[in-house]
Amino acid sequence: MKLENNPAKDLIRIFCFILCTIVICDYVDSGNVYATDANSAFPMFKYNRERTGKTPFDGPFKNEIKWYVSSAGEIWSSPVISKEGNIYITSTDGNLLAIAPEGNVLWAFKSEDEIFATPAVGENGDIYFGAVDGNLYTVDAYGKMKWKFNTNTSIHSSPVIDAEGNIYFGAYDGNLYAVDAQGKLLWKFKTGSAIIASSPAIGQNNTIYVGSWDKHLYAIKRDGGLMWKFRTEGKIDASPAIGNSVIYIADVTGKLYAVNLDGTLKWGFDLDSRTHSSPVLCSDGTICIGTHDGGVCAVKNDGSLKWKFKTNKPVTATPTVDAKDIIYVGSWDGNLYAINKDGSLKWKLDFKNSLLSSPAIDSRNNIYIGCADWRLYAVGQ
């Protein structure tokens, strides 16, 4: 089964993507950039609860398109992958698609409104995602809805799931929501403005970190109480990354921050460009992030520049890092780039349309990525 394709002609809605693109154990060592069960292929945005973007899988050996699936709406979200290898992607026609590793559509679940948020897959195989209608949906592995939780406001933030199965996500009303596995509200924490695209990360002692348009990074206790908040220079669309006992976050003005676990600033780095990408981590602690001036910036864990890689157009998507520290990222120029850890180009693959989705890598060494032509692509051997 393939859904009808009608390639996107209009990129005005790029801003919606920018706002939206931007989930182990009860205790996690924040110095471990993998920090998840390697049997879970790619269960959430930026791979794990710490949102490091670092996977234990190698990327593809060949930069060839294996197959694609056409959606009936624009794809602004990023794919996720279950333990069984099934790929899940959302689109603006309100559908959640389930796709087998061979490229056939298994089922489509229709929500009540557009979907911009990346879904998350739980340990039991349930899929969680938010929609513009204000609902957090839970759908089982067969495409049947189990429950939905309504916030009465748009959801573009992608959920993160803790070890107990509780789900955390942000919403346009400025609240960080905590919902249990049965869809019951545990608590909500109010920030000073909307939580648009920032997707929460979970660190030590189940502390939840999320950014807000009120120009603050928040650290929230597992009971919903405030631990601390850190002031940034600009609004936050990015999702935090946790590693080496540091929280990394960027604001839209192009400032990258390393924040200590007590909420104090370790260092700041000026990217010299606006950014709507989120930071990811390499094995040696290098932080990589896309920039609006067209490229990827790599910053050492001491806050100094390591290298810059130039693309032809902006990079608003968040990179993904494979087991060998090769960085994969798409650009508005239509290319998927594979960048070596020294900043040199390994390869690139031209999709002829903007790549606004973040890539997911599975244990079979395939990359999956959404494109502005309304298609989900598989790249590999």
Image (cartoon, rainbow, N blue to C red):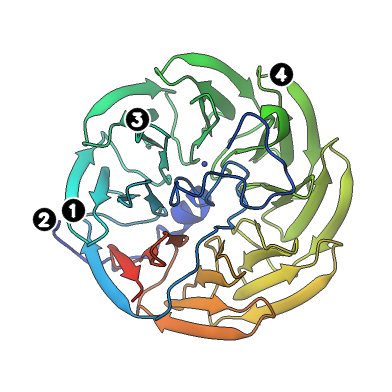
Snapshot quadrant of residue 102: bottom left
Q: Residue at x 52, y 24 (%)?
A: 164
Q: Residue at x 14, y 58 (%)?
A: 2
Q: Amino acid at mark 2?
A: Met
**Location of residue 226 in the rendering, given as x and y in whole percent from the top left corner:** 74, 23
Describe residue 309's horizontal placement relative to residue 172 as left or right.
right
Residue 273 against residue 142 in the figure, above or below: below
Q: In the structure shown, which secondary structural element does the residue marked by tag 4 occupy? A: loop
**Decide: marks 2, 1 in contact (CB < 8 A)?**
yes
**Location of residue 288 in the rendering, given as x and y in whole percent from the top left corner:** 67, 65
Q: Which residue is mark 1?
A: 105
Q: Earlier in the sequence, mark 4 or mark 2?
A: 2
Q: In the structure shown, which secondary structural element does the residue marked by tag 1 occupy? A: strand
Q: Nearer the viewer, residue 277 or 246?
A: 246
**Decide: marks 1, 4 in contact (CB < 8 A)?**
no
Q: Nearer the viewer, residue 148 or 373?
A: 148
Q: Nearer the viewer, residue 281 or 353?
A: 281
Q: Which residue is mark 4?
A: 225
Q: Amino acid at mark 4?
A: Gly
Q: Amino acid at mark 3?
A: Tyr
Residue 249's mark? none
Q: Residue at x 44, y 61 (%)?
A: 361
Describe residue 305's horizontal placement relative to residue 310 as left or right.
right
State the separation of the CA atoms marked 3 and 1: 20 Å
Q: Which residue is mark 2?
A: 1
State the separation of the CA atoms marked 2 and 1: 5 Å
Q: Earlier in the sequence, mark 2 or mark 1?
A: 2
Residue found at the very far left of the displayed protein: 1
Q: Amino acid at mark 1?
A: Val
Q: Could you tell me if residue 90 is visible in this image?
A: no
